[in-house]
Image: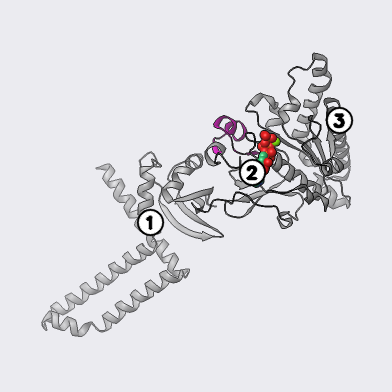
Amino acid sequence: MEDKKLAEARRRAIRRHRFTAGLREIITCHRAKAIIFLAYLLGTSWAWVNRDKALTLLSGGYPLLYHGLSLTLLLVALVLLVEIIIALGTPRRAAQIQAALVEAGFVNSSRLPPLLFSVHKAEKSYIYEFDLNNIPLSRWERDKEKIGAAIRCQVVNIKLSPDGRRVLLQTVPLRSALPEIIYWKDEYLSPEDFILTLGMSLTGRLETVNLADTPHLLIGGSSGSGKSLLLKALMGESLIKGASVFIADFKGGVDYAPIWHERCRMIFDPQSLLAALEELTAELERRRGLFAAAGMPNLTEYNKATGENLPRYIFACDEVAEVLDTAGVSKADKEAVYAPSVRLMSLIARQGRAFGIHLMLSTQRPSADLIPGQIRTNLTLRICGRADDILSRIILDSPAAAEQIPLDAKGRFVTNMGQTFQGFLFDDSILNE
Ligand SMILES: Nc1ncnc2c1ncn2[C@@H]1O[C@H](COP(=O)(O)OP(=O)(O)OP(=O)(O)O)[C@@H](O)[C@H]1O
Ligand SMILES: [Mg+2]
C-alpha cells in the first residue's frame, strides 16, 4: 500500500516536472517543439470557433446537450494540451533509457532508476541531465560504462549541476571513438603560462594541465602504452615555453635524440642526480627568499610584479622506478646518494609548486612502494595508459585505465581527474623551432 502511494507520488512528481520542462522548452523556443505547440493551439482554436455546426447536429438542437458537448470539448482540449506539454518535456527514448538503467541495476535503494530530465546538444557532445536519485557521484563514476550502455552513448565526463541536485553526463556517440593517431600541430600549444596540452579528448577538445595549479605529475602504463612519448611531449612543450628541463635517465640518454641533449640537462648517474636535485632545491630556497622579500606568493605573481622572467624548472624522469631502485646498491651509496636524492625530490614534491619547480615522472612497474609515499601523494595529476587492473589502481586508484583503454591502444590515457585523451604523435623536429 505504502509502495503504491510512493509510486503514485513519484509518477505525479515526474509528470509535474515533465510539464514544467515542456513549458521551458516551448518558451525558450525549441523550434520544432514550439511549432507543434502552436499548431495544436491553432487547430483547437479553429475547432472551437467552428464548433457550432457540428455540435448543433450532434445535440439534435437540445441546448443543454449542446452546452454539455461544448464543455466536454473544452475539457478534452485542455487535457490534451497538458499531455502535449508533458510529451514535449519528455526526452526522446526516456522510457527505454529508464528501463535499461533498471535492467543494468543502476537504481537507488528503492530500486528506482534516476529520472532523465533533459538531453541537450553541446559542442560535439550531448549532455544528459539526470536527477541524483540518492546515488552518490562516486557510484555514477564507477558505473559509467553501465550507464553508457543504457543510454547507448559513451560517457566522457560526469559532474554535478551548479545546485548540486542534478547529474550532468557529457556523452559522445559510441562510434565517435578517437582516431588512433593524432599528429601534433603547433596550434595545440596553449598560449597561457603555464598550461601544457596533454592530448585530445573524446569530444575533440584539448585536454590540458596547468602546472601553476597542478604542479607535478605521474604517468603510468604498461610497456608500449605511450608513456615516454607523452612525457616527451610535455617536456617539449615546457621547453618551447621557456622552462629549463632536467632529464634523469640512467640508460645514458639513448632514447633521446641529440636535440634533447642540447636543450636539456641530462643526468646519467646517481651522483649527478643528487647534484642536480641539490641545485634545484637550492634554487627553490633562493626563490623562497626572493618571493618573501617581494611579498609575492608564487612564481607567476613574482614574475608579473617584478618584470623578471624566472623560468620554471622541470625535473623529468622516465622509468622513475629504475632510478630510485636500490636493489644491488651498496649500503654506503644508499645512505650517501639515494636517501638524500629521495629527500630532495620529496621537498620539491611538497613545495615546488609556488616556486615553479615541477616533477614529471613515469613508471610501468606495478609496485606501489617504488615511489616513496611523500613524493607519490604530491603527484597530483596521475595519468595512466593501457594497463591491467593492478597498475591502473596503483596509478589512478581506480580500474578506469584497465576498463576504458583497448588492449592495442597506443598513446591513449585516462587521468585521475576522469579525462580520457589521445596523446599526440610528433617527432623531435618540433624542438628545432
Ligand atoms: N600518442 C601516440 N599516438 C600513436 N602512437 C603512439 C603514441 N604514443 C606512442 N605511440 C607508439 O607506441 C610506441 C611505444 O611508445 P612509448 O615508447 O612512448 O611507450 P612506453 O609506454 O614508454 O613503452 P616502454 O614501457 O616500453 O618504454 C611508440 O613507438 C609509438 O610508435
Ligand atoms: Mg618508455
Distance, label 1 to label 2, CA atoms, is 35 Å
- Residue 225 occupies quadrant: top right
Give the mark, 1 or 3, whose residue is nearer the N terminus: 1
How would you rate the neighbour count of disc 2 (Cα within 10 Å): few for under 14, some for 14-19, many for 20 or more? many
**Residue 393 within the segment the image draws in magenta:** yes
Distance, label 1 to label 3, CA atoms, is 62 Å
> Front-most of 289 and 272?
272
Rendering coords of residue 410 (x, y %):
62, 42
**Does ligand 1 reach within 8 Å of label 2's beta carbon?**
yes
User: Residue at point 53% right, 54% down?
Assistant: 176
Left-right relation of 303 to 56: right
Magenta segment? 379-400
Disc 1 and disc 3 in contact, CB within 8 angstroms: no
Say above or below: 314 vs 60.
above
Q: Which residue is mark 1?
A: 93
Q: Which residue is mark 3?
A: 278
Q: Total label count?
A: 3
**SS of the residue at dot 3?**
helix
Rendering coords of residue 4 (x, y %):
26, 45
The quadrant of the picture showing ligand 2 is top right
Q: Which three-letter amino acid code belongs to the residue tagged 3?
A: Glu
**SS of the residue at dot 1?**
loop
Disc 1 and disc 2 in contact, CB within 8 angstroms: no
**Residue 23 within the segment the image draws in magenta:** no
- Residue 357 occupies quadrant: top right
Q: Which residue is mark 2?
A: 411
**SS of the residue at dot 2?**
loop
Viewport quadrant of the N terminus: top left
> Front-most of 47 and 407?
407
